[in-house]
Amino acid sequence: MTSPRPLSAPRPSSPRPQRLGVRVWTALVVVGLVGQVAWTVENMYLNVFVYERITQDPTVIAMMVALSAVAATVATLLIGAWSDRTGRRRLFVAVGYVAWGACTAAFGLLSPSEGAVAAPFVLLAVVGIIALDCVMSMTGSGANNAAFGAWVTDVTTPRTRGRADAVLAALPLLAMLVVFGALDGLTRAGEWRTFFAVVGGVTAVSGLLAWMLLRDAAPAATLDVAPVAVRLLRGFHPSTVRAHAPLYLSLAMLAVIGTAAQVFLPYVIIYLQYGLRVESYALILGVSLLAAATISVVGGMLMDRLGKRRLLLPATLLFAVGLLLMFFARDTVTVIVAAVLALGGMMLATASASATARDETPDGQAGMVQGLRMVTGTMIPMIVGPFIGAWVIVGDGRTYLDLGVERPVPGPAMFLAAAAILALVPALVAWRTRRERTPR
């Protein structure tokens, strides 16, 4: 049995334009932002919905996040390889966004009209939410992470990827700001059905916009007609890993940064609302996200000028400092300052590692590499991170009283755990540098 053919090397030069046009930027922002709005609902507000309406057990949230991450990764690997085979990213994005919107709206059907799910039906509700979350994650990841992410690689160049990835890295923060500012009132009022319907409708409409805005890039210089199954296995073969070690080390950095983020992100709204008892948490998050997004965009401009790799370690340090400050922060001003540093550093570090991985992507394999990025940047972090966070929360033993009932609540210790994980980034940077200096 022969091993899968190694990936081709990245092209030394590219005929793609060295400036991104208005259509490309519009597609990046519109399609990317709406996708991140849908992910914000899935990654954060769905957790709040489960906490308020179904169960306060943090392990259920961790299990839901982990299983949806596995489902999303499988979809990204399949759609990424399939879109490489056909070269039709546009079709996968447009159809996928419409289906994604329908799945998001369907969450409203599982929401009680008022109050929490009755105790005898909690298990059934948990199973239903997790199953629908997995289906939604598969459609969303196939459209956004696989097809749209590969399209971004197709239409950008090493000279434009720093800025493009910095904007993409800022979009999750802007999406949170949009959701907090425009839709948080619906969740506070218990209007979960309307909340999911609005987000689902906007996501479906953006699929139609994607069909009009996106244009598939020219086919790769070297045509690869390998079956989808071969493409799926190729990225995991040891010979491929050895031949493209810098790429896989960059992906490992995304795994570390993402895991640190997922230790606290699934629980941060619950922490602010029920742990710190902050009534204006939406305002705090809005100011923090806007400032952090600005840091990310400005940092992206610096990446294109100074180099993507040079900013990775400073950005990681900024992320860690912000997390340490979050551990001590109790008042509004300190929380905002700490959150700006943590989120800004997180976005810059993610953008640096992500843009570097795009530069190291072999020609014609953008979809397959998006699948690998899904494994390292999403699946591993969303499996490992939330369970670490849940373990820390349970071990911390913090609770609050709700109508005489003692309920568990996240504490600041999760920020320390996230900061400790970031210590692996400098080690990976040193490993990649040493590997690049070693002759093959």
Image: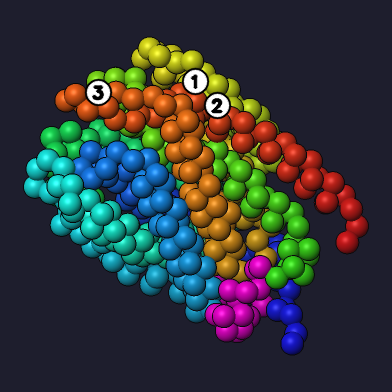
Q: Name, please, the residue furthest toward the left.
A: 113
Q: Look at mark 2 in the image and give the residue it sits on.
A: 416
In this rendering, is residue 318 above or below 351? above
Q: Name, please, the residue furthest toward the right.
A: 439
Amino acid type shown at disc 1: Phe
In this rendering, is residue 367 above or below 298? below
Q: Earlier in the sequence, mark 2 or mark 1?
A: 1
Looking at the image, which residue is at 53% across and 57% down?
Answer: 374
Residue 96 lies left or right of residue 113; in this view the side is right
Looking at the image, which residue is at 65% across and 50% down?
Answer: 252
User: Any magenta on residue 68?
Assistant: no
In the rendered structure, which segment of residues is drawn in magenta?
Answer: 215-236
Residue 326 picture location, percent across and down: 48, 21
How many numbered circles does the render carry?
3
The residue tagged with tag 3: helix, strand or loop?
A: strand
Closest to the observer: 196 or 159? Answer: 196
Contact check, label 2 and label 1, Cβ < 8 Å: yes
Q: Look at mark 3 in the image and give the residue it sits on.
A: 401
Residue 365 picture location, percent across and down: 61, 69
The circle on residue 327 is 1
User: Any magenta on residue 230?
Assistant: yes
Give the alpha-carbon distance from disc 2 to disc 1, as whole Å.
7 Å
Give the alpha-carbon distance from disc 3 to disc 1, as whole Å.
22 Å
Closest to the observer: 65 or 353? Answer: 65
Q: Earlier in the sequence, mark 3 or mark 2?
A: 3
Contact check, label 3 and label 1, Cβ < 8 Å: no
Residue 134 picture location, percent across and down: 36, 61
Closest to the observer: 266 or 175? Answer: 266
Give the alpha-carbon distance from disc 3 to disc 2, as whole Å.
25 Å
The circle on residue 15 is none
